[in-house]
Amino acid sequence: MKCFGYDTRRFFLCGMRLFFGSWLLYVGLSKWIFMGPGTFVGYITAEFDKTWSPHVLNVLLGWLIIAAEPVLAVLILSGREARKVWTLTALLMFLLTIGQTILMKPDVIANWQFLALTLLCAALSDPE
């Protein structure tokens, strides 16, 4: 595997591309396959309609999440435009973190860890 010959930074980014990209692809596709887009968007809408967030924003949020996860995963795995893709992924992780905060979920700390990890990958990815 090419990664074994890389310097420390490139080795870390190669591993993150493989592991995080595969995980995000699984997460994204499982929502399409096992839940279905309508069910997932309905779940997000039902959860956030209980808060101050407007219904139309909640519907858009559901569709954004279900579309962005597999698309960003494929882009991460491709390795192209790495800084842009990791930055967009960090923005998605921030969106998920804010969502968990609005819902007052205690497991929001996991989202902060993903946010920090994806932002680190963006920072370490040199622009092309």
Image (cartoon, rainbow, N blue to C red):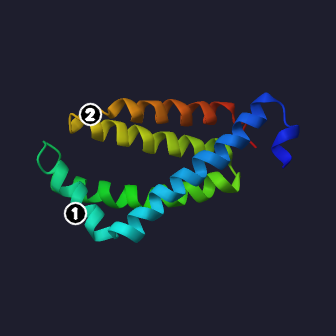
Which structural element holds mark 2? helix
- The residue wearing badge 2 is 101
Please give the label number shown on residue 20. Answer: none
Is the C terminus in the top left, top right, bottom left or bottom right quadrant?
A: top right
**Residue drawn at (85%, 36%) of the image:** 6
Which structural element holds mark 1? helix
Compared with residue 83, is residue 78 higher up or lower down, i.e. above or below? below
Of residues 92 and 127, the one nearer the viewer is 92
Compared with residue 66, is residue 115 higher up or lower down, i.e. above or below? above
**Residue drawn at (71%, 34%) of the image:** 12
Compared with residue 35, is residue 43 higher up or lower down, i.e. above or below? above
Image-based side of 25 in relation to 53, left or right: right
Image-based side of 28 in relation to 97, left or right: right
Image-based side of 30 in relation to 39, left or right: right
Of residues 35 and 63, the one nearer the viewer is 35
The crowding category of the residue bearing disc 1, from other C-alpha atoms within 10 Å (few below 14, some 14 to 19, many at least 20), is: some
Q: Earlier in the sequence, mark 2 or mark 1?
A: 1
**Residue drawn at (38%, 55%) of the image:** 65
Q: How far, Cα to Cα, is label 2 from label 1?
A: 19 Å
Q: Residue 44 is drawn in which quadrant? A: bottom left
Can you give x and y, in whole percent of width and height, for residue 8 in the image? Answer: 79, 29
Please give the label number shown on residue 42. Answer: 1
